[in-house]
């Protein structure tokens, strides 16, 4: 049968298969003392069952086993866990077996009698080798990703730096993470960042919006069902927990889940098992869970709509996305980034932004956060016929025109519009003689107006950088 020795800080998970219990036990004991988590199995069946249940890094397997040869067993274990690093224990002189083992997927072999120091050296070498391969794959993908920066997290404000640092730390762990924050603050973006920075970045990332799927269907979508579980279930359905494998399952708007589904989710997180609808036995799951909500879960708990135990379990590791209005210093960079993203999507040249429009954007209330900013810019790029986005291209409800007006008095309003009009014309047409002609003024009258109205003729690029940041 199989058993496990758990170490406090495992540096690798090893399965030892040997039908001589003494060899298996002493090797396991030794590897455990070196900091590995070690499982042992005397029989092939026990090894296969274990491989279905536990993620493993290294297999050490005797060639001579009852029932199934070590090479055949290795092959079947590799089908279950293709990334397993396999080593076979062979008796001295059976070179042919060793060659055969390499051909069928072994990474190395060990000669009997075992020398533990050599076993250790080979294991460390293999684990290091695999890490290098993973790093290499990861670097290559990062290089590719740099051509597709749509998923970059922008923001150098202290709050966003803090988020980035936490994401880096959490990405290295399999911890369940709860992301809180108002709508549009970038919760999904952060969930993706957590996945892409994790060691399991090659696995799937699946997002489910719990608010968008009817409550009864959600449970089915998440946990799957067996054929015949109810009328219409004419075949097995896997469900997202299983199809995501060891990847990340992003549960968006988790507060919308029914209490029954919440109970099943808690079991999946705590026991790492689920019960598909109509199934007799539970199934092991390995998904990493990242949940998000824009609700105050504490009040949901108080109102009885959210399970308290699930809340505490999710809240062990949580992140709160700061609202955009609390980090206005990120706005110039975000606007720059989103305009570039927009241009890529539309295949157009990147739009510029007029200084007064930029100032208005920095001062806007941003109740809808980055999503609202992205929508406003999208609208502006489409509406603006020119390549420069001006104040009038911005959504009227966003730009508080009242606040920009000095007063309601007709003379003030007229001066205000006169100034706006001349500023805009001068921007589009920097040649003052030309501008004066189009305004129906003499050149000297135009200069007088510029003086009287306090119009600043600034270099747009320079002012973009120098615009002072406002706080709320
Ligand atoms: N820091 C950021 N840098 C770059 N883009 C961002 C940032 N934050 C958000 N975005 C963009 O804004 C949009 C909204 O972000 P996201 O969908 O992650 O927000 P959310 O919090 O999940 O919102 P909702 O609650 O509305 O679902 C996305 O297009 C995202 O790429
Ligand atoms: Mg979202």
Image (cartoon, helix red, strand yellow):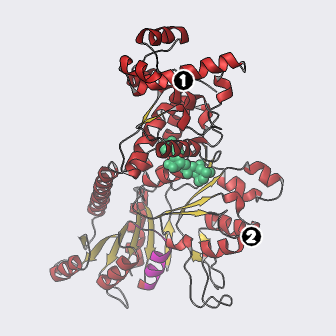
**Res 89 → quadrant:** bottom left
Element on which disc 1 rests: helix
What residue is at 71 percent from the left and 61 percent from the top?
Answer: 256
**As displayed, is residue 384 above or below residue 266?**
above
Is disc 2 in contact with disc 1, using a CB cutoff of under 8 Å? no
> In x, y percent, where is residue 314?
65, 54
> In x, y percent, where is residue 184?
59, 47
Q: Is residue 190 visible?
A: no
> In x, y percent, where is residue 56?
42, 68
Residue 18's tag is none
Reading the image, the residue beneath label 2 is 260
Q: Counting residues from the N terminus, which is met first, the one under dot 2 or under dot 1? A: 2
Residue 420's tag is 1
What residue is at 39 percent from the left and 25 percent from the top?
Answer: 429
Tell which of 237 and 315 is nearer to you: 237
- Magenta-span inclusion, residue 147: no
Instruction: Give the alpha-carbon distance from disc 2 to disc 1, as whole Å.
Output: 59 Å
* Start-end of magenta stretch: 45-56
């Amino acid at each position: 049968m199989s058993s496990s020795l758990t170490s406090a800080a495992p540096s690798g998970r090893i399965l030892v298969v040997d039908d001589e219990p003494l060899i298996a036990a002493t090797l396991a004991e030794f590897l455990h003392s070196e900091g590995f988590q070690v499982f042992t199995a005397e029989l092939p069946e026990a090894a296969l069952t274990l491989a279905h249940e536990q993620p493993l890094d290294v297999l050490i397997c005797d060639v001579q086993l009852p029932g199934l040869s070590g090479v055949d067993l290795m092959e079947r274990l590799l089908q279950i866990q293709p990334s397993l690093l396999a080593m076979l224990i062979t008796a001295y002189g059976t070179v042919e077996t060793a060659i055969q083992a390499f051909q069928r997927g072994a990474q190395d072999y060990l000669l009997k009698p075992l020398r533990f120091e050599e076993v250790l050296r080979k294991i460390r070498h293999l684990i290091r080798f695999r890490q290098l391969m993973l790093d290499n794959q990861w670097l290559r993908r990062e290089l590719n990703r740099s051509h597709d920066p749509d998923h970059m997290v922008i923001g150098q404000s202290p709050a966003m730096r803090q988020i980035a640092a936490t994401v880096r730390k959490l990405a290295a762990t399999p911890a369940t993470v709860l992301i809180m924050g108002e709508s549009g603050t970038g919760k999904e973006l952060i969930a993706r960042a957590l996945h892409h920075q994790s060691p399991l970045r090659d696995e799937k990332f699946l997002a489910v919006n719990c608010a968008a799927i009817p409550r009864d269907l959600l449970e089915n979508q998440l946990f799957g069902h067996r054929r015949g579980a109810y009328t219409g279930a004419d075949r097995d359905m896997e469900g997202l927990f299983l199809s995501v494998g060891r990847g990340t399952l992003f549960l968006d708007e988790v507060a919308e889940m029914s209490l029954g589904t919440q109970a099943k989710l808690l079991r999946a997180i705590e026991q790492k098992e689920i019960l598909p609808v109509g199934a007799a036995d539970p199934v092991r799951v390995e998904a990493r869970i990242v949940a998000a909500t824009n609700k105050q879960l504490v009040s949901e708990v108080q109102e009885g709509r959210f399970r308290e135990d699930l809340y505490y379990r999710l809240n062990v590791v949580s992140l709160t996305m700061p609202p955009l209005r609390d980090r206005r210093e990120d706005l110039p960079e975000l606007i720059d980034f989103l305009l570039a993203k927009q241009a890529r999507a539309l295949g157009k040249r990147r739009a510029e932004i007029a200084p007064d429009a930029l100032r208005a954007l920095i001062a806007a209330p941003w109740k809808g956060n980055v999503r609202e900013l992205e929508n406003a810019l999208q609208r502006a790029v489409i509406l603006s016929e020119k390549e420069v986005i001006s104040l009038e291209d911005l959504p009227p409800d966003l730009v508080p025109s009242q606040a920009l007006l000095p007063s309601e008095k007709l003379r003030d309003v007229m001066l205000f519009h006169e100034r706006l009009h001349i500023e805009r014309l001068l921007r589009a047409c920097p040649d003052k003689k030309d501008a004066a002609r189009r305004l129906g003024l003499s050149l000297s009258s135009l200069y007088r107006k510029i003086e009287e109205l306090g119009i600043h003729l600034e270099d747009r690029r320079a002012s973009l950088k120098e615009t002072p940041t406002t706080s709320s």
